[in-house]
Image (cartoon, rainbow, N blue to C red):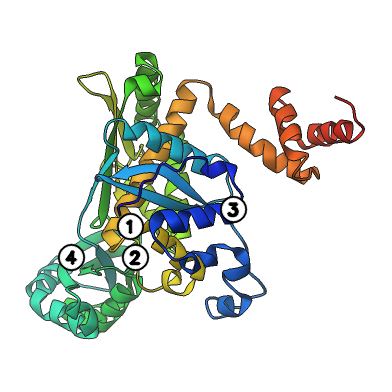
Amino acid sequence: MSVYSRLSGFRDVPPAARRAQLAEHTGRAPDELSALDPSEGLTVEQADHMIENVVGVLGVPLGVATNFTINGDDVLVPMATEEPSVVAAASNAARIARVAGGFHTSSSRPVMQAQIQVVDVEDPEGARLRLLDARAELLRMADEQDPQLVELGGGARELSVRVVEARPGRYVVLHLMVDVRDAMGANAVNSMAEAVATRVGEIARGRVLLRILTNKADTRLARANAVFDAATLGGADVVRDIVHAGALAEADPYRAATHNKGILNGITAVVLATGNDTRAVESGAHSHAVGADGRYTALSRFETDADGNLTGTLELPMPVGLVGGATKVHPAAQSAVRLLGVATAQQLAEVITAVGLAQNLAALRALATEGIQRGHMSLHARNVAVSAGATATELPQVVSRLVADRAVRADHAERVLAELRAGRP
């Protein structure tokens, strides 16, 4: 990942020229990014093999966030989202982070968990110990289910057993922990869970019911941190107010819900662009935001360092992969992965987490200064103008008027467009 991510004039050229610039800049052959053009992307025939009852495909805008430096390397980040300002905000926050060296990331091993639920157990605590005693046998049975994963260095690594108090009674729940290497891992852990389920029921002396992965992927964490220069942010007062805004999200679940949604604006966009499971990542993130005390809180933390600069940290589960699923069958996702240039699922997870932190910082900075609507609505004005019927040549003037009048509404856009076409200023 040695790409210079500062692309001068990138936003001022048409999409086709941007793709050509990306190919040249990253050393990719143009055809490696051709699937990013809708005419070359996912076909209805390909889609028909991905899900049921296919009638068409839905296009989502795919942009590229610039300015990212992650662990000393420049990265161009593909982001798929329908929401205006997301790509621009992430790019701007990454530009600020560059001043102090960009983002620094790390991650734990790509370990996913499956749960096996046993009901109708007479002695749950005894069953728990019997299952722990059978650890070696159960891990061996799990590995026999997926010898290819074992050959790649992955496989079943550990198990734990919990006794869960529930309304109908007490359940014995075995957790099977599997290193899934560069896969998201759902299929691998589910297959292993089903392979050992009968034996688990025999040892526990109960009836096995559920045997499926958990999306609370707290054994597969990614972390990002960065220092944001105080002067570049806008001064000490802005740093102070960003810390205050972040602290409210830590203390108040009403603020935390929107704060974390802002983080996921960036994360989900990269997850979707690379063909990964957005719902798995989002559910894991929200479950991680619930602390030991059961209170929902912010996923990120912002503080002031000894030099008065802002520091930001983010840690959350990141179950993403580079093999299997849509990542391997969706042509645009394949192009996005090539553009990103990551070689492992852990690298991908770390890039995504850095984007989440950048998105969060951008939102908090806007909230602490001009308010979130000014920047967002100026970009939203383009959608409103297009919906009103503005052509490419009319678009700049209509957008300029909507923003200047502070009235980014469909009725006002239609009025401005009518005046423009009538020759009135």
Q: Are marks 4 and 1 in contact (CB under 8 Å)?
A: no
Q: Secondary structure at mark 2?
A: loop
Look at mark 4 in the image and give the residue it sits on. 161
- The label shown at residue 15 is 3
The earlier-in-sequence mark between 4 and 3 is: 3
Q: x%, y% of residue 263?
A: 42, 42
Residue drawn 26% across and 18% down? 308
Q: Residues within 10 Å of mark 2 (few under 14, many from 20)?
A: many
Q: x%, y% of residue 167?
A: 35, 59
Q: Residue furthest top?
A: 237
Residue 363 in view (yes/no): yes
Look at mark 1 in the image and give the residue it sits on. 348
Task: Locate residue 310: give its quadrant.
Answer: top left
- Give the foreground label among 4 and 3: 3
Residue drawn 82% across and 31% down? 416
Q: Is residue 84 left or right of residue 270?
A: right
Q: Three-letter amino acid code at disc 1?
A: Leu
Residue drawn 36% across and 40% down? 357
In the depicted structure, whether residue 190 falls above or below residue 368: below
Q: Are marks 2 and 3 in contact (CB under 8 Å)?
A: no
- The label shown at residue 321 is 2
- Give the foreground label among 2 and 4: 2
Q: Secondary structure at mark 3?
A: helix
Q: x%, y% of residue 226?
A: 28, 35
Q: Three-letter amino acid code at disc 3?
A: Pro
Q: Is residue 55 left or right of residue 340?
A: right
Q: Three-letter amino acid code at disc 2?
A: Gly
Q: Residues within 10 Å of mark 3 (few under 14, many from 20)?
A: some
Q: Three-letter amino acid code at disc 4?
A: Val
